[in-house]
Amino acid sequence: MPSEFRKQADARRREQRREALLDAAAAVFVRRGYHGALVSEIVSEAGAGQGTFYRYFRDKQGIFEALFDRFVASVFAEFSEMSANLPRNVEEYRAASVAAIRRIAARAEGNRDLLMLFVREGPTVGEAFERKLRGFYDGLAALARGYLDHAIAGGFARPCHADAVSQALVGMAFWMAQQWWHGRVPDLTIERLIEEMVDFAFFGFGRSAAGGDGGTVR
């Protein structure tokens, strides 16, 4: 029987082959678009055979969905530290939010072309992928609601309709990310934009809430 070490080595090789196919698919999809890409191009990019491809993915849509799943998992992973060490006051809540969103922004910037492809062509791939997109939005809103419920229970956020507010926060984040990517807020760095959005979420328009003079809390 294969040793445990051999089993682990085989599992690592399988995962490496799968990741190589995903990386190749990302390059081909960005270059050719979803509908223009071919499985043969993906395996050629990866230096693999079609048999290898079909051991891991059912078809082109399957690997496209797997690429999206990989990105989604990486986004939620950026909140793991905040979830493990829940903020105890508004200052910690704000700092943790800014830090997590900055990490996500850096990851998104590194995958900008692929993310724009998900947004632009994802809804044309099929109902299954459209459900994945909705699930991503809903998952982020549920995460935001969990943090908001915690803050309300801790007394450092005002009582509100947490579900509606969480949906609004996620909607604002996605809209402003697209505006920044398209160069429609040229006078702001991404770091400053993140702080502006977080401070708006925390303090709204109120002058006194944002430190007494309407300025951004630093």
Image (tube, rainbow, N blue to C red):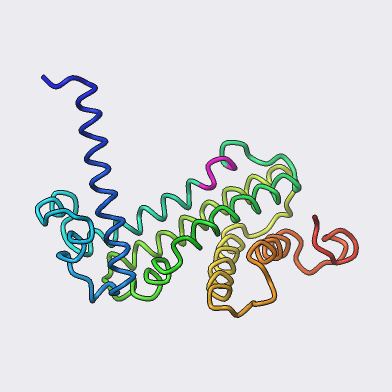
Q: Is residue 186 magenta?
A: no
**112 in relation to 107, above or below:** below
- Specify the quadrant that holds the C terminus: bottom right
Task: Looking at the picture, tell me which residue is in the foreground, 113 or 115.
Answer: 113
Image point 60% across, 80% down: which residue?
Answer: 184
Q: Main secondary structure of the magenta part?
A: helix
Task: Looking at the picture, tell me which residue is in the foreground, 202 or 192.
Answer: 192
* Residue 195: percent from left, percent from top: 70, 61
Q: How many marks?
A: 0
* Image quadrant where residue 124 sits: bottom left
Range drawn in magenta = 78-82
**48 in relation to 80, above or below:** below
- Specify the quadrant that holds the N terminus: top left
* Residue 10: percent from left, percent from top: 20, 33
Q: Residue furthest right?
A: 212
Name the side, left or right, on which 173 lies relative to 77. right
* Residue 12: percent from left, percent from top: 27, 36
Image point 86% across, 58% down: which residue?
Answer: 211
Name the side, left or right, on which 77 lies relative to 28. right
Name the side, left or right, on which 107 lies relative to 33. right
Image point 25% across, 59% down: which residue?
Answer: 63
* Residue 64: percent from left, percent from top: 28, 62
Q: Residue furthest bottom?
A: 184
